[in-house]
Image (cartoon, grey):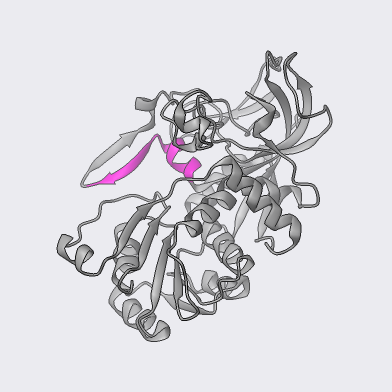
Amino acid sequence: MLSYDVVEHGKPLQRAVRDTPRPKGKEVLVRITRSGVCHSDLHIWDGYFDLGGGKRFYVKDRGCVPPFTLGHEPYGVVEALGPDAKGVAVGAKRIVYPWIGCGECAVCRAGQDNYCLQQRFIGVFRPGAYASHILVPDAKYLVDAAGVDEGFAATLACSGITTYSAIRKLPALTGRDWVVVLGCGGLGMIALSTLRALGIERVIACDVDDGKLAAARTAGARETVNSRDGAAAVAQIQKLSAGAVAGALDFVGMPATAHLGIAVLAKGGRYVLCGLFGGELTTPLPSIAQRAIGIVGSYVGNLQELREVVALAQSGKLKPTPVETLPIKEVNRALDELKAGRILGRVVLDVDETA
């Protein structure tokens, strides 16, 4: 099998060829055809997350030590089954749900693998999909996305469920309420499409890039605001929404977007943080209580949420966002362009074992 591996943090991924694994027990071997390139991959590639104040969280402290294979948005074809595998046939095309837990604890039994403390996340703690093959622990983590474009389907395994799960954490919306989307990169664009699919129309998209804001309007934003000047952006959002912002979805996750998202909330509103850009937040505590606002973190999503997102895509309500497809041999170019902010929408690798 072929893979492109992190050998040294921050350095170009290296091509490797090794024996293709054989599935055991309930395992399923999937031959990868598409693999999404996610912004989170950049942090793992660099080797750390920025915690603000000069502090860092190093991925090696969680056991993510080179060499390893990135890629947590896998789509492919079932190639082989372990002797105890059930529920899928060889040749079936499937999205692979990557946020796999231990499968035994109370959290996993409740269907919340993504919150398990004994994580087995594909592309993070298990070999990922920047490769021709991956082993999946159980066929239950495979989701049929028949009728959905393969490149777009791959992105649903992370960006799709991340945005969907975040939207589900918003308070109940009325006809006068507005939702603010902070950041119009890959996550922001699919969030706009998902909001529209769910019938939420009063949406204001924010970014510092006017080109991305134009794309956001096409994707479903009713209004757009350039947020480079934070104070001006707050005033503009409050005017556009008549002070009725019920929710802010932050797909950047830096101090500037956090302060903006919290500042524009109406009383009882909720700020939902998904982005991992980094930094730290300082905000007055009394105002959180006095405004009755919520500050909520949202991390990827669970298996049922993936099934629901796929169903939205299959129904035609969830429209595909821009997806650029590159051959896997150009994975380093993809990472560099993503890091430089030159990607509009998402980039997906076309995985060819001979590349």
User: What residue is rendered at 47% in x and 75% in y?
Assistant: 174
- Residue 13: x and y in percent read 55, 32
Chain part drawn in magenta: 40-52
Examine the rendered structure and indicate whether residue 298 appears above or below residue 221: above
Is 225 on the left-hand or right-hand side of 256?
Answer: right
Q: Is residue 339 magenta?
A: no
**How many discs appear?**
0
- Residue 183: x and y in percent read 46, 63
Examine the rendered structure and indicate whether residue 46 appears above or below residue 86: below
User: What residue is rendered at 70% in x and 53% in y?
Assistant: 311
Q: Nearer the viewer, residue 72 or 314?
A: 314
In the picture, residue 216 is in which quadrant? bottom right
In the picture, residue 269 is in which quadrant? bottom left
Q: Nearer the viewer, residue 14 or 345?
A: 345
Q: Nearer the viewer, residue 202 or 335?
A: 202
Q: From the image, which quarter does the N terminus lie in?
A: top right
Residue 295 visible? The answer is yes
Examine the rendered structure and indicate whether residue 230 appears above or below residue 86: below
User: What residue is rendered at 42% in x and 37% in y?
Assistant: 46
- Residue 16: x and y in percent read 63, 23
- Residue 257: x and y in percent read 35, 63
Residue 155 visible? The answer is no
User: What residue is rendered at 32% in x and 60% in y?
Assistant: 294
Is 56 on the left-hand or right-hand side of 282?
Answer: right
Is 203 on the left-hand or right-hand side of 96?
Answer: left
Q: Is residue 47 magenta?
A: yes
Is 353 on the left-hand or right-hand side of 347?
Answer: right
Q: From the image, which quarter does the C terminus lie in?
A: top right
